[in-house]
Image (cartoon, helix red, strand yellow):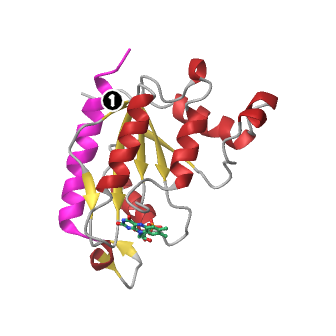
């Protein structure tokens, strides 16, 4: 049986070119099923949240971010941890996306969180904060399996500059399948 198309938007919470989280996203993308129609939303040009600016007219980069989220059956955020929390660019983007509440791109939408770090914690605290913010906005955050990639520097193919790790790949497969089921829970 062919599965119905699911629209998935992915977001990387690191802006840097050689980001480990971008490399994790690349590894995960290779496990995405064919019936997922995937779009990436970028945070590079999202201005700081400013209610006066919003009142004067939502900035184009934010309109684009919200459009990419609203078309999606599910959104996957792959992000670093900064100072035991989420990066400011991620919080800022989620604040914009949640506003105004009547037109929130987060409410009643499925989300999943993933992250990689050279440290030992696997971005658990960053994900915990994002979960809190998304829950406040009445999003549906997948409870598990969790995608926490610790000690990522040792999992790199140094020649190719790609993340290559069998355990991470196997876990990404499970994570992607679980998110497929998670999105279906909120169909219709
Ligand atoms: C301001 C700052 C704070 C950081 N705090 C943490 C932290 O709390 N936990 C952690 O695991 N790594 C922390 N790091 C290290 C990041 O995990 C590391 O820089 C990582 O490479 C960033 O992700 P990226 O490679 O996708 O850009 C921090 C880095 C910066 C710049």
Q: Which residues are magenta?
A: 164-188
Residue toward you, 5 or 47: 47
Whether residue 48 can be seen here: yes
Image height of 28 relative to 104, above or below: below
What residue appears at the point 27 percent right and 75 percent down from the top-left corner?
Answer: 155
Note whether ligand 1 is within 8 Å of mark 1: no
Is residue 174 magenta-colored?
yes
Percent across and percent down for residue 173 are 23, 50
Name the foreground residue: 96 vs 110.
Answer: 96
How would you classify the magenta stretch by its main secondary structure?
A: helix
Quadrant of image for the N terminus: top left
Q: Is residue 7 left or right of residue 15?
A: left
| Residue labelled with disc 1 | 183
Residue 127 is one of the magenta-drawn residues: no
The residue that appears at 42% across and 35% down in the rendered structure is 134
Snapshot quadrant of residue 187: top left
Which quadrant does the C terminus fall into?
Answer: top left
């Amino acid at each position: 049986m062919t599965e119905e198309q699911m629209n998935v938007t992915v977001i990387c919470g690191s802006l840097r070119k050689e980001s480990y989280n971008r490399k994790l996203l690349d590894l995960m993308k290779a496990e995405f099923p064919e019936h997922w129609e995937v779009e990436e939303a970028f945070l590079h040009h999202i201005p700081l949240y400013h209610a006066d600016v919003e009142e004067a007219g939502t900035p184009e980069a934010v309109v684009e971010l919200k459009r990419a989220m609203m078309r999606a059956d599910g959104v996957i955020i792959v992000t670093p941890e900064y100072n035991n929390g989420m990066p400011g660019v991620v919080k800022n983007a989620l604040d914009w996306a949640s506003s105004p509440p009547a037109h929130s791109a987060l409410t009643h939408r499925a989300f999943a969180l993933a992250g990689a770090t050279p440290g030992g914690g696997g971005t658990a605290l960053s994900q915990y904060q994002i979960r809190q913010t998304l829950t406040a906005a009445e999003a549906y955050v997948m409870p598990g399996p969790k995608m926490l990639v610790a000690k990522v520097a040792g999992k790199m193919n140094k020649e190719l500059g790609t993340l290559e790790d069998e355990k991470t790949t196997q876990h990404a497969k499970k994570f992607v399948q679980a998110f497929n089921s998670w999105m279906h829970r909120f169909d219709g």
